[in-house]
Image (tube, helix red, strand yellow):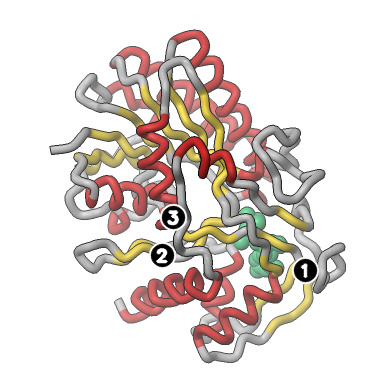
Amino acid sequence: MGNKYLVTGGAGYVGSVVAAHLLEAGHQVTVLDDLSTGHRAGVPAGAEFIEGRIQDAAKWLDPSYRAVLHFAAFSQVGESVVNPEKYWVNNVGGTTALLAAMRDAGVRTLVFSSTAATYGEPETAPIPEDAPTAPTNPYGASKLAVDHMISGECAAHGLAAVSLRYFNVAGAHRAADGTTYGERHDPETHLIPLVLQVAQGRREAISVFGDDYPTPDGTCVRDYIHVADLAEAHLLALDAARAGEHLICNLGNGNGFSVREVIETVRKVTGHPVPEVTAPRRGGDPAVLVASAERAKELLGWRPSRTDLAGIVADAWEFARRKETA
Ligand code: UDP
């Protein structure tokens, strides 16, 4: 009947989609989430749910778990700049407690939700994993600190770990039972859900944060990856993890799309007008962030299959409309 997995942050966007994929693959899933940013309704049916903090993971971890998939973290760049201590206490302190609980319980496999924000302003595009890490905000710094902690845990205590560095996760996943899992942040700060809110008439216009970047149309270029492709990489990572090794893999499509291209795609997919206004640059935004995911393809055997931006936007649109009618 499959293996048993603890998914921290499984009431959030990516965690809930990965939990749904694990269940669909026949595994048992326990979600640990304090609901500080996640939603109880996001926890897939069939998962056991514990409302609790990762700091207290020792209360629930036991040797019956084959591995932990760790998503629980604060993830807002802007908030991390004004309240950095929140990011150190939760993202770093919480993971310290989680690693200790895993050691004590003898759970020796970890898949960690890392981020392209660990690289900061890149010198190259696409970005390989051996690019310099120089985060430009406390969020990225806290995730990089955890990556370093995990490397130490592997070397000293034989943990088997894979860190997956996500680029711009987007889209929604429709599970076998028809439930759709998508992006629902409050406040919403991400481009695609915000542009969809404009298409729905819930916002007047989308602000384009800077149109004077050194890119073809002057707006920032990002690598948008479908959340279901991302989830599949986590299941492959569980198989690829080796005792004493910390594998770090980027996850992206290697294709960059500008802010204006995303807005235009939303217009085409939804058929709605999307007014836009040019606004000042947002602090800390690199001009271009595009992944080289060659390592994930080679070492995990990962094959993303939903790489078309219009398809990613269409899935996010379906989720946004369901939410509106729910
Ligand atoms: N962006 C924008 N207007 C918005 C939100 C985002 O122009 O209302 C831009 C942002 O500056 C960045 C890109 O869209 O260049 C993607 O931003 P998002 O917050 O979705 O992801 P990030 O790249 O910060 O992880």
Tag 2–tag 1 contact (CB < 8 Å): no
**Quick check: is the Cβ at mark 1 less than 8 Å away from ligand 1?**
yes
**Where is mark 1, residue-wise?**
219
Please rate how many residues cluster around mark 2, counting C-alpha atoms within 10 Å: few if below 14, some from 14 to 19, many from 20.
Answer: many
Please rate how many residues cluster around mark 1, counting C-alpha atoms within 10 Å: few if below 14, some from 14 to 19, many from 20.
Answer: many
Q: Amino acid at mark 1?
A: Thr
Name which residue lies at 47% across and 31% down. 162
Residue 59 point in image, percent of width and height: 27, 23
Locate residue 110 relative to residue 269 in the image: left or right.
Answer: left
Q: Earlier in the sequence, mark 2 or mark 3?
A: 2
User: Which of the two residues, 308 or 281, is positioned nearer the viewer here?
Assistant: 308
**Where is mark 3, residue-wise?**
229
Name which residue lies at 41% across and 31% down. 240
Q: Where ligand 1 lies, by image quadrant?
A: bottom right
**Where is mark 2, residue-wise?**
172
Element marked by disc 2: loop
Q: Image quarter for residue 148?
A: top right
Locate residue 325 relative to residue 276 in the image: left or right.
Answer: left
Residue 7 point in image, percent of width and height: 33, 39
Name which residue lies at 63% across and 73% down. 262
State which quarter of the image contains the N terminus: top left
Q: Nearer the viewer, mark 3 or mark 1?
A: 3
State the residue lying farthest toward the left.
Answer: 1
